[in-house]
Amino acid sequence: MVTTPGRDTSARGGDAALYDEAGQARFDELIAEDKRIEPTDWMPDDYRKTLVRQVSQHAHSEIIGMQPEGNWITRAPSLKRKAILMAKVQDEAGHGLYLYSAAQTLGTTREQMMDDLISGKAKYSSIFNYPTPTWADMGSIGWLVDGAAICNQVPLCRASYGPYGRAMVRICKEESFHQRQGFEILLHLMRGTQEQREMAQESVNRWYAPALMMFGPPDADSPNSAKSMAWNIKRFSNDELRQRFVDMLVPQAEVLGVTLPDPDLKWNEERGHYDYGELDWDEFHEVLKGRGPMNAVRLERRRTAHEDGAWVREAAAAYASKMAARDERIAS
């Protein structure tokens, strides 16, 4: 049973409320029975804060993640590839909107989340702070980055917070398409010219380790994982998910004909899993702190897009206000 002593907030809007013993008991019961917490339910303040952090960071990652692939829309090698890539980037925008909406049910606002992102206060997945200099990177992002996302996100369909879990169902269906699309790009390149095969392998070499680090630091160094798992937000630890991903990649790499850049990668009969080499966690933390190859560029482009789109938001708000006033007049 999970308990959270002390002062908490009510379920809607973050209004201050005294610790609710009955609410806590009901919350603990729902978690113990592996049932869903809904926005109208009482919840501990720590649970709410953990969800706001996780769901908003997930939303930010979807929005920032549009940039590395959007970089190739105008340079895709064919009209077919361009159309598929445009559809994928549009999917990522939709994922961000689903997740921002889920976070808003926890009492935070879309404006606050966006301000936190463009100010650099909020974090997003470190993987999107790497450059995409070749077309093969569209394949590696699909196969490795979206593949890692699927491993991480499918269990989130069972997250204890209802709006988050329900949003993940559709997101995971679309991410599965994205992963297959990336695999197909790499397969096409590996069946092409020597230059194309080399480009594909070079891209996989760059994206392999950052993709493995997407699951977060080792369990011993991950302060948020244990709490999220106790609350049934997460279902598996960072290291468990990373192992699943490696075990999935090896046979797929054999089909593609690419070599995973890890000399320590080998089957461990006793464990029934693949062993893999140490990752560069110093690099991970540097990128997370904003000192990666593309951090500054990603945030500046998001900030500029947000500022350039201010007139659209203002017009939409004015229209909504006008319609609300009209509906009020009709009702009266």
Image (spheres, grey):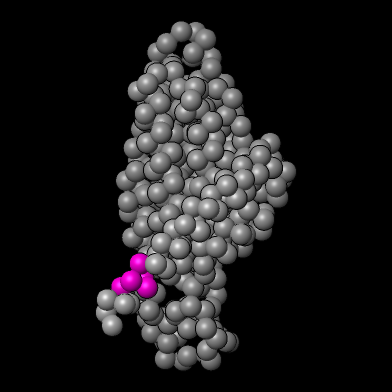
Q: Is residue 74 left or right of residue 293?
A: left
Q: Could you say which is closer to the camera, residue 97 or residue 222?
A: 97
Quadrant in which the C terminus is drawn: bottom left
Q: Quadrant of residue 261?
A: top right
Residue at the limit of the structure toward the left, as seen here: 331
How far across and down, in percent of the image, does residue 306 sit? 57, 50
- Highlighted magenta segment, given as a residue range: 323-327
Quadrant in which the N terminus is drawn: bottom left
Q: Could you say which is closer to the camera, residue 306 or residue 214?
A: 306
Q: Could you say which is closer to the camera, residue 313 or residue 41?
A: 313
Residue at the image point whose x is 40% and y is 13% from the top? 191
Q: Is residue 303 above or below residue 49?
A: above
- The majority secondary structure of the magenta stretch comes to helix
How far across and down, in percent of the image, does residue 23 sit? 42, 87
Q: Is residue 53 above or below residue 15?
A: above
Residue at the image point whose x is 33% and y is 60% from the top? 166
Q: How many marks?
A: 0
How far across and down, in percent of the image, does residue 213 sit? 58, 44
Residue at the image point whose x is 53% and y is 49% from the top? 309
- Residue 123 visible in this rendered orientation of the protein: no
Residue at the limit of the structure toward the top, as seen here: 193
Q: Is residue 55 above or below residue 170?
A: below
Residue at the image point whose x is 67% and y is 54% from the top? 120
How far across and down, in percent of the image, does residue 40 sit? 38, 79
Q: Is residue 148 above or below residue 195?
A: below
Q: Could you say which is closer to the camera, residue 179 or residue 318?
A: 318
- Residue 90 visible in this rendered orientation of the protein: yes
